[in-house]
Image (tube, rainbow, N blue to C red):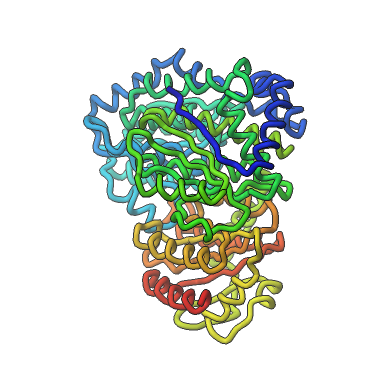
Amino acid sequence: MTGAQSRTLPAALEADVARKLQELQARGGTRALWAKDASFWSGRDEASWLGWVDLAAQQLSDMAPLAALRAEVEAEKLDHAVLLGMGGSSLCPEVLRETFGRIAGFPELRVLDSTDPAQVGAVAGDVDPARTLFVVSSKSGSTLEPNIFKAYCFDRAQKALGGGAGKRFVAVTDPGSNLEKEAKADGFRHIFPGIKSVGGRYSALSHFGMVPAAVLGLDLQRFLGEAQRMTAACAPGVPAAENPGLVLGTVLGTAATQGLDKLTLVVSSGVYDLGAWLEQLIAESTGKEGKAIIPVDRERLAAPDAYGTDRLFAYVRLASGPDAAQDAAVAALEKAGKPVVRIDVPDLYALAGQFFLWEVATAVAGGVLKINPFDQPDVEASKVATRALTDEYEKAGHLPAESPFFEGGGIKLFADAANTAAIQGATLGARLRSHFARLKDGDYFALLAYLPMTAENEKALQVARHAVRDARKVATCLGFGPRFLHSTGQAYKGGPDSGVFLQLTCDDAADLPVPGKSYTFGVVKSAQARGDFQVLADRGRRALRVHLGRDVAAGLRSLGEALKEAVA
């Protein structure tokens, strides 16, 4: 079973969706995907990025390498496996880990996708290299974060194991990449090839998702079989009105053209982390040329009157583990006339079908919006700014000096000249109130936290986001840096100027060196935060940076008190 899909939409939107589906039926439904017809989108290089449409069949036809890896890992009875990657290389493995947990007879899978030194130490610093398999995952092989993760872990393995360190490592990368060359030189156990025509966020069913799935111990035949069933359901021969990927994508794209561009994800607890994967897929694919579908993940459901008129709700419901409270809250939204799409997921293994369903839907939504859903033109801007800052550090031994425009309660505020002039007030709470006053109907608020990604920090930030949501009735987003740079960061910079941003930074309580470099992980994280803010400012975004100092918990408490004043 692929799972049922239904929708409750306003009459005008439903009529537009029906008309668009008729138009797409006349054009062959999803034919453009399988025919690699770039005219469905912007007519640029889209045809070069459609290698993902038949991945399930490709994988099932050649299962031997993945099956062998799974058998090796099971036979070795390892304690841990650590996935080193960012964005499309890390989010699918994270979803699998959070959904399936640790499977008996296989290692605990950890995912490292943060340069925060506390995070690096917590994920990779306490494992025994002799009892761990490290999976270095990078499509291009030149991305900063996986490279320094690998340097840190390989250095630890060499110190513990000497010349045999490479046998504890596996690489997933495109053929010919720098990582492939390095993996061969370092004697990696295996090198699994990526596919050049499959972009990172569409790579869940490729080796970038399936190598970690094998290490985790999933039944790969069953998993990929679910993906193949969804592939058949979305194929060109299926009538448009019955094609789940085409229908979902048409709803998403058509709703966005009518101002319902805040896609609020409601996901059952059993598959809750799917929302993090969907954030990247949707935001990075649609957030460009001043357009975007802004995904809203892990925002607590509220009564219908808490929401503006820019919301479309997508309820991904695990049929084998539904939540009665979620069901009731979504039913209340439907009763109040809010637009809702319901998608049933029969069981955990049907998650594979969801990967493919949403890939098709996102590609179709890109066609409706007339943008290229396979590029990420604004992601590079933050990378360039970060590189400039790390280069400066290597030359001067420090990052460029900066001065706050406000200090109080152990917190410092930073902004560019335009934002500094717009944010007024005598206290921290007054300054935040001034910043939040710039939120208008149809805007969204985003918390960008360059802090350790801990349960305690996330809890405090969730309180903050909901305080703003409830006071201003706007959609809210919460992302931890630098991982969101490879995810929602594209939409924040390339999408419409409808975001109001609060970036949070801190001084690291302890730092870690990057082997072979003069800078540390803490320096990299700081450079990424400052580079990110610089690009937001360069794009004229409404942004404020709050620096919490070394005691993050105390800083978050002070920020929480100021927020109460700001939204009162």
Q: Is residue 288 above or below residue 234?
A: below
Residue at x 56%, y 51% (from the top left corner): 485
Q: Residue furthest bottom?
A: 426
Q: Position of residue 323 (x, y in %)?
A: 35, 44
Q: Residue furthest top?
A: 61
Q: Residue at x 47, y 55 (%)?
A: 299
Left or right: where does residue 520 sit relative to residue 108? right
Q: Position of residue 162 (x, y in %)?
A: 30, 39
Which of 43 and 316 lies nearest the eye of the viewer?
Answer: 316
72 to the left or right of 254? left
Q: Quadrant of residue 451?
A: bottom left
Residue 84: percent from left, percent from top: 42, 42
Q: In the rendered view, tell whether residue 467 sits above or below residue 519.
A: below
Q: Nearer the viewer, residue 105 or 396?
A: 105
| One can see residue 551 in this view | yes
Q: Give how far across and how far down residue 158 sits, in percent.
A: 33, 41
In the rendered structure, the answer to whether residue 399 lies left or right of residue 190 reads right
- Identified at 63% across, 48% down, the residue is 261
Identified at 35% across, 19% down, the residue is 67
Using the rendered image of the protein, determine whether residue 175 is visible from the camera's viewpoint.
no
Quarter holding the N terminus?
Answer: top left
> How many numbered marks are there?
0
